Image (cartoon, rainbow, N blue to C red):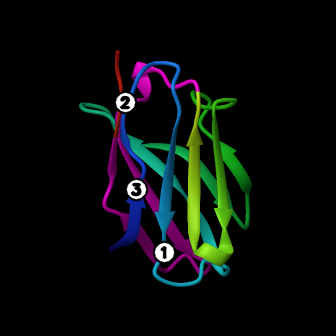
Amino acid sequence: QVRLVESGGGLVQPGGSLRLSCTAPGSIDSSGAMGWYRQAPGKPRELVASLSRDEGTNYADSVKGRFTISRDNAKNTVYLQMNSLKPEDTAIYYCYERSIDWRDLYWGQGTQVTVSS
């Protein structure tokens, strides 16, 4: 189901920064996990970063040290701060929210990130 609202994508030069936002329609206090996937043309969807009650914070090796995931429960929003962007970070980024009982999975509509000079 698509129910999360994403924003913050765009075109940026290599080395630049972007911050993606993902807002849920209700409280995220009791979410099991929230995070971000990305999909580049011709490539499988890749988990970029996640915040999980069970596993804490995780990042793909390719973004460690450059991306930071955070949440603001008061705003029902999860953020992905992306620094030192590279052309290979170009993809559509999708946020997700998983319920604590693993029964429900919600998605955002996707936001395009393009890193190019």
Question: Residue 55, located in which quarter of the rendered image?
Answer: bottom right
Circle 3 is placed at which residue position?
7
Q: What residue type is labelled 2?
A: Thr
Check residue 87 for magenta coloring.
yes
Circle 1 is placed at which residue position?
24
Q: Determine the residue located farthest toward the top in the rendered image.
A: 117
Q: Which of 97 and 85 is in front in this view?
A: 85
Q: Earlier in the sequence, mark 1 or mark 3?
A: 3
Q: What residue type is labelled 1?
A: Ala
- Coordinates of residue 10 in the picture (x, y in percent): 35, 39
Circle 2 is placed at which residue position?
90
Question: Residue 44, located in which quarter of the rendered image?
Answer: top left
Q: Residue at 47%, 63% (x, y): give it.
A: 96
Under circle 3, the secondary element is strand
| Left or right position of 16 against 28 | left
Give the vertical position of 88 relative to 101 (above or below): above
Q: What residue type is labelled 3?
A: Ser
| Left or right position of 12 against 33 | left
Pick the quarter of the image with the N terminus: bottom left
Check residue 11 for magenta coloring.
no
| Residue segment shown in magenta | 84-112
